[in-house]
Image (cartoon, rainbow, N blue to C red):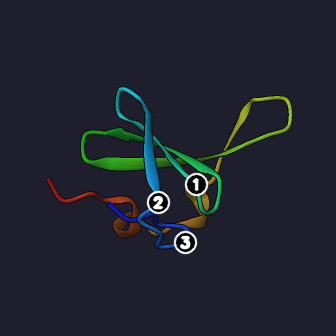
Amino acid sequence: MRCPNCQSKDIGKIGTNQYYCWNCFVEMSLLKGRLSMHQVEEDGSLSSLDDLFEDEDLQIGM
């Protein structure tokens, strides 16, 4: 899997269907073959980045 944001393969699994890109520091959740992208804020909350990507960029081939 490659990060849709930076194309890095430096992805770590942090939970069930949850991944983290160590290159651009974006958290990803996988649900029904689609990634949901989030930025981790200073207070630990997540801000959605999905509106920055096209739908086909967030689809994962199973």
Q: Secondary structure at mark 1?
A: loop
Residue type (three-letter) at the residue carrying disc 2 = Asp
User: Is residue 41 or residue 20 the one in the foreground?
Assistant: 20
Q: Residue at x 54, y 67 (%)?
A: 5
Quadrant location of residue 57?
bottom left
Could you tell me how far apart the alpha carbons at marks 3 and 2 are, in whole angstroms? Answer: 10 Å
User: Is residue 13 or residue 61 the one in the foreground?
Assistant: 13
Q: Residue at x 33, y 49 (%)?
A: 34
**Left or right of residue 1, residue 36 in this image:** right
User: Is residue 50 or residue 22 the one in the foreground?
Assistant: 22
User: Is residue 5 or residue 56 the one in the foreground?
Assistant: 5
Q: Secondary structure at mark 3?
A: loop
19 lies above or below 22: above
Which label lies toward us, 1 or 3? 1
Report x, y in % for residue 39: 68, 47
Residue type (three-letter) at the residue carrying disc 1 = Trp
Residue type (three-letter) at the residue carrying disc 3 = Cys
Residue neighbourhood size for the residue with mark 1, other residues' Cα within 10 Å, grouped as few (<14), some (14–19), many (≥20): some
Residue neighbourhood size for the residue with mark 2, other residues' Cα within 10 Å, grouped as few (<14), some (14–19), many (≥20): some
Could you tell me how far apart the alpha carbons at marks 1 and 3 are, in whole angstroms? Answer: 10 Å
Report x, y in % for residue 53: 52, 66
15 lies above or below 36: above
Quadrant location of residue 56?
bottom left
Which label lies toward us, 3 or 2? 2
Q: Which residue is mark 3?
A: 6
In contact (CB < 8 Å): disc 1 and disc 2:
yes
Report x, y in % for residue 7: 46, 73
In contact (CB < 8 Å): disc 1 and disc 3:
no
Could you tell me how far apart the alpha carbons at marks 1 and 2 are, in whole angstroms? Answer: 6 Å
Q: Which residue is mark 2?
A: 10
Q: Which residue is mark 1?
A: 22
